[in-house]
Amino acid sequence: MNEIIDRRNVEFTLYELLEAEGLNRYQRYAEHGRETFDAAIETAHAIARDKFQPHNRKNDLNEPELVDGKVQLIPEVKDALDAFIEAGFLAATRDYDDGGMQLPAVVAQVCNSMFQGANIGTSAYTFLAAGVAHMLEAHASEEQQRKYMDPIYEGRFFGTMALSEPHAGSSLADIKTRAEPTDEGHYLLSGAKMWISGGDQEISENIIHMVLAKIPGGPPGVKGISMFIVPKYLVNDDGSLGERNDWVCAGLNHKMGYRGTTNTFLKFGEKGQCVGYLVGEEHKGLSYMFHMMNGARIGVGMGAVMLGYGGYMASLDYARERPQGRHPDQKDPASKPVPIIEHADVRRMLLAQKAYVEGGYALGLYCSQLTDIQHQDPDPAERERAHLLLEMLTPVMKAWPSDYCLKANDMAIQVHGGYGYTREYPVEQFYRDNRLNPIHEGTNGIQGLDLLGRKMMMKGGEGLKLLGREMQATIGEAAEVAELKEYAEALGQSLHRIGKTVEVMGARMAGGDIRLGLANATLFLELTGHTIIAWIWLKQALTAHRGLARAGEADQAFYQGKLQACRYFFRYELPLVQPHAELLQAMDDTTLAMQDKWF
Amino acid sequence: MKLMVSVKRVVDYNVRIQVKPDGSGVVTDGVKMSMNPFDEIAMEEALRIKEAGNAEEIIAVTIGEQKAQEQLRTALAMGADRAIHVEVDEDIQPLTAARVLKALADKEQPGMVLLGKQAIDDDQGQTGQMLAALWDRPQATFASKVDLDGQKAKVTREVDAGLETIEVDLPAVVTTDLRLNEPRYVKLPDIMKAKKKPIDTTSLADLGVEAAPGLKVTNTAPPPERQGGKKVESVDELVSELKNRGLI
Ligand SMILES: Cc1cc2nc3c(=O)[nH]c(=O)nc-3n(C[C@H](O)[C@H](O)[C@H](O)COP(=O)(O)OP(=O)(O)OC[C@H]3O[C@@H](n4cnc5c(N)ncnc54)[C@H](O)[C@@H]3O)c2cc1C
């Protein structure tokens, strides 16, 4: 089995780059330090390695089945989740008094990502359960929290997010599921939901679906969407389980990857008896769901990173051990073949993988640390800064790793040659598993629209200005270091190109050219994503540069690797920004002007 | 009854060991360190004995550098009640470790001292036996099952011929084998609780123990590289090949 992640890189990112130990400046984390963080990460790694990773392939080969209306999974899934829950990972960030560890979000993210890397299919159940619990903590009534949230944190109930319908995925405005009020205070739901991950299973005592539905007579579109708690078994006031609610799992989807996670087609209220409980206020459901989705988007990006990481670790091992061919200037056919890592083209593929996965990893943890600052900092201005940065970075963190760490998986297969195309090696599964990530939690196309159409324009462009200031600080620092000066300049230019692009496009869109303006939003997302990852690489390079000065032998190599990956990203990847920016600024209409008939 | 468990800080079992170029030992710089896996089993067994109501207190002991306190914290998070750190910077030989544990046993009067059957760093497997001799108490080594019965313990041992069950009077020394149990994972809230549990620091001098000079490492070398195998076509060929190599 491959290493889940390079542990030295975890240390580097968490402690050297992000200086996460300093989080104990916040009251909530005052008792924490590197020792407690490391102990939590160590436990996560041990459980991920012992309980999650060993059945990753078995999950893939044994898709869940629906037998007599019950979903069957291999038993290892429950064993692994039990270990996860028993160790306290579901409640890791909660208060000490509630059985939690008050772990900072950034450390919890390190832990969770270990499970994603070890077995993405199995880890999804608790990933969703935790997301639902956090959302209920923010928006549900006290009674609802007691009945539904507490049992989730205890690991007895799991949860799902049920937004998509067969005809409405990207466009939630068009959902048809209805919720009729009753005199008893609850609602009766009817409709169908498609693609619901973890939508049925027999692992947990109960399943809490968070369903988006429309209350008749409400406003049209997304302004008329409400959120409901729809349990599998109704919960009595004393917490005991009551009747089976009126929804069924009408089918399982057969997927390319992520096979350990059941993916379901659900029908609600076929007998007219599907009970749902309104969360918060009517018609505000989408904003509550965004609470969960924003966290989930960063989590999806992290999942993409970790699948990419697995492929990188596996192909690095392989490249060191596979002898093949000789250097092009070696003319003696009797000479010993070299391990393929000696070939520059294989190194290119390994370096690209390293640049993608370690860049994505650092961005993901940076985002998680922003959530800590957003919630814990005593200074309101600092909280607002973190919040705004997160808004800007979330679509990038969702989409960039799901595109580029998928590319990393593609290269991991290529490094393995023919062997990579077989099931004897793990890399083809990583690729198939990772192929989901550009699709769910809002397709990458939708992320592009969010970034360009909304985030760049909101608050008079305040978000972009903030991002620019953050980057300028790094650029200023790097400009002082001879070896990094070149990159500092390149990043400055890219940042300038984003600014110029937004200025040109913003003006045209304000003038009514909205359709044309958004036609190339995906390119804009890629351009911004590359610039942000370049920034993150420059930060890493600065940290590595400082580290080199006092490094022992093993660390020297580690830091050199960081500097070289930074160099790769700036020389081979970042230049992509320029043609993208030119195309965007020219308001190119090639795609928009293409006609259906011409295909 | 009190239980005393020894815990050693060693290179993590997942690390690919590298020998230092000058042969003076293995590389530990920047290498991940953990609790010796056999000691985790000893710790787990102690917890089970306590949870079954047969012991009141578990004391974890380590002998080693300052950083070995990390492993004591792990033991405390697993459930030990308190810990003793005997701070020593040099490598510890089995006889020194046994002398330290003897001194602590005299002080703490445990009903049982549990140790891993060996530490995976140098695989010597001697400390438990030496302790039993110095302490003048019975030993039950390579345990794969431990049952307490009043002032006695019935212990199943893994021996070359299979399994052997013996009965020892307490206090006794028990060293643990792999199949004894599956150690628990540390629970997150217990990591925080462990921070508040006491660790007493002491030294060889405080305990009146003299380090044993006995062994000197003269050279460390990696095992020879494995030679490629060879396929044979028939049984006859196999037999003659084995004979040629003087293997039969
Ligand atoms: C394995 C899996 C698990 C999932 N889990 C869940 C879950 O747990 N809960 C849940 O609610 N949903 C879940 N989904 C649903 C997922 O979020 C949707 O598939 C996704 O939002 C896309 O919706 P769709 O499939 O209907 O595709 P469509 O919306 O039909 O999109 C098809 C294509 O058109 C593009 N497109 C659509 N609209 C626009 C537009 N306005 N502008 C530009 N391009 C556009 C899209 O980007 C995409 O490329 C899951 C999906 C999968 C495959």
Image (cartoon, rainbow, N blue to C red):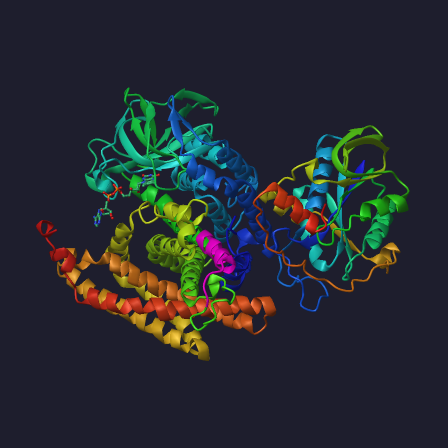
Question: Where ligand 1 lies, by quadrant?
Answer: top left
Which quarter of the figure has residue A357? Answer: bottom left
- From the viewer's perspective, is A226 left or right of B18? left
Magenta segment boundaries in residue numbering: A310-326
**Of the pair A236 and B246, the residue shown nearer to us:** B246
Is A318 inside the magenta-drawn segment?
Answer: yes
Spot occupied by residue A7 in the image (x, y as percentages of width and height): 54, 56
Instruction: Note whether A45 is above or below A136 in the view shown.
Output: below
Residue drawn 47% across the image and 25% down it: A239
In the figure, is residue A336 to the left or right of A121?
A: right
Q: Is residue A499 magenta?
A: no
- At horizontal 49% and vertical 58% (from top left) the residue drawn is A322
At 49% from the left edge and 39% from the top edge, which residue is drawn? Answer: A55
Task: Evaluate whether residue A25 shows in this view.
Answer: no
Q: Is A267 located above or below residue A464 in the figure?
A: above
Q: Position of residue A525 (x, y in %)?
A: 28, 58
Rendered image quadrant of residue A195: top left
Q: Residue at x 46, y 52 (%)?
A: A310
Residue A549 pos. (x, y %):
56, 74
Of residue A566 and residue B26, the one placed in the foreground of this image is B26
Q: Residue furthest left?
A: A597
A326 and A277: which is toward the camera? A326
- The answer, for residue B141, to whether it is visible in the render is yes
